[in-house]
Structures are given as C-alpha cells and as structure tokens.
Image (tube, rainbow, N blue to C red):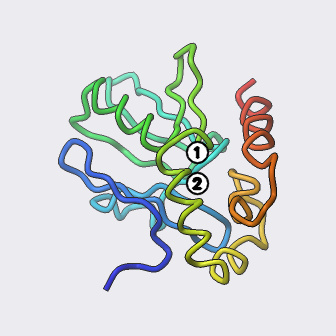
Amino acid sequence: MPDRHEFYRVEICGRLFTGTVYADGPYLKMLENRTFGQGAPLGSALVISRSAGRRWYAICKHGHPLIVLPLFSDEDMEVLAREFGIPIAGRLRKLSFAESPAWSALKRWVKRHPEIARACSRTDSSAPGWHDVDFGHTGNVARLRTIRTSHSR
C-alpha cells in the first residue's frame, strides 16, 4: 500500500528518492539511506555539496541531517538537483524547490490530501507556504523564492 504522505518518487543512479510530507513539512529521503530517519528538509535549508574526498552529499545548511550520495556522478547530481530544486554549492545558478518537478507534485498532493497537509502545516518549514499552494493563495512561490534567496546569502 502506498504511503499517503509521499508526494514524489524518482530513481536516480539506481537509488529511489522520495518527497514525503512529515509533521514539519516536505522532506527528501533516499530510501536506501536509513541512517537519518525521515531525510533532509526540502526548501531553503537544503544544499548539495562535495566533501574533500570528492563524495557528494545533500545536507541541511544547519548541519544535519545528511544524505550521503556514493557513486554519484556530476550528471547524477544535476538530475537530483533539478528534480527537487536543490542548489549545488559553488554553482552560479541557484535552483529553487518552487520551480522543481517535486514542487509541482507537492501541489497536486496537497489538493488530493488537504486534511493531511493542514495537519502537517502547523510548524515552521524550510518551504513556507507549501501546504496552501492549491487553496487560492497566490504569492507563495514568490514568498518561497524570497526566503530561499535570503537564506542563500
């Protein structure tokens, strides 16, 4: 039976990534990576970077949680970044969750599950306004872009 909190799923480099809504908003999770439970928050707090050992990882700007991405090529990272709107550290073009396929899927999910979205929207999130995107509130994408820009400085 599918998880009613999952709004997006994509396979990249042989690994399954999901967008899932938890009590404090949308998260990215690599299903093969169980180390950090629910994954990393999607939105302004998440960035993709490379360690000194050349291993890619997605990390919350506040330290943890961390998703290690072993064996990922530069092309694989580009795909992951585009699918979930995650900026890659050191790149000039900053991606936005609000412009990603995952965001579009989240908007459809909110429309199908408004009661779950409302219940999960009562706490702060790295993707403000995610829960009311399909309820006639305009400006949420612009608000998310503004917040994203202020966090990336």
Q: Looking at the rendered structure, which numbered label has been put on residue 60? A: 1
Query: Separation of disc 2 and disc 1 at Cα?
Result: 7 Å
Q: Looking at the rendered structure, which numbered label has been put on residue 77? A: none
- Foreground pick, 27 / 68: 27
Residue lying at the far front of the rendered structure: 136
Residue lying at the far left of the rendered structure: 14
Residue at the (32%, 25%) spot, across then down: 53
Residue at the (32%, 30%) spot, across then down: 55
The residue identified by callout 2 is 41
Residue 95's place in the image compared with 19, above or below, is: above
- Foreground pick, 136 / 13: 136
The answer to which quarter of the image holds residue 35 is bottom left
Point out the frontmost of discs 2 and 1: 2
Q: Is residue 11 left or right of residue 6?
A: left
Q: Return the x and y of residue 89 as percentages of the image width and height.
A: 53, 23
Look at label 2 and name its amino acid. Pro
Dot 2 falls on a residue whose secondary structure is strand
Residue at the (81%, 46%) spot, across then down: 139
Q: Return the x and y of residue 116 as percentages of the image width and height.
A: 63, 80
Residue at the (67%, 83%) spot, across then down: 115
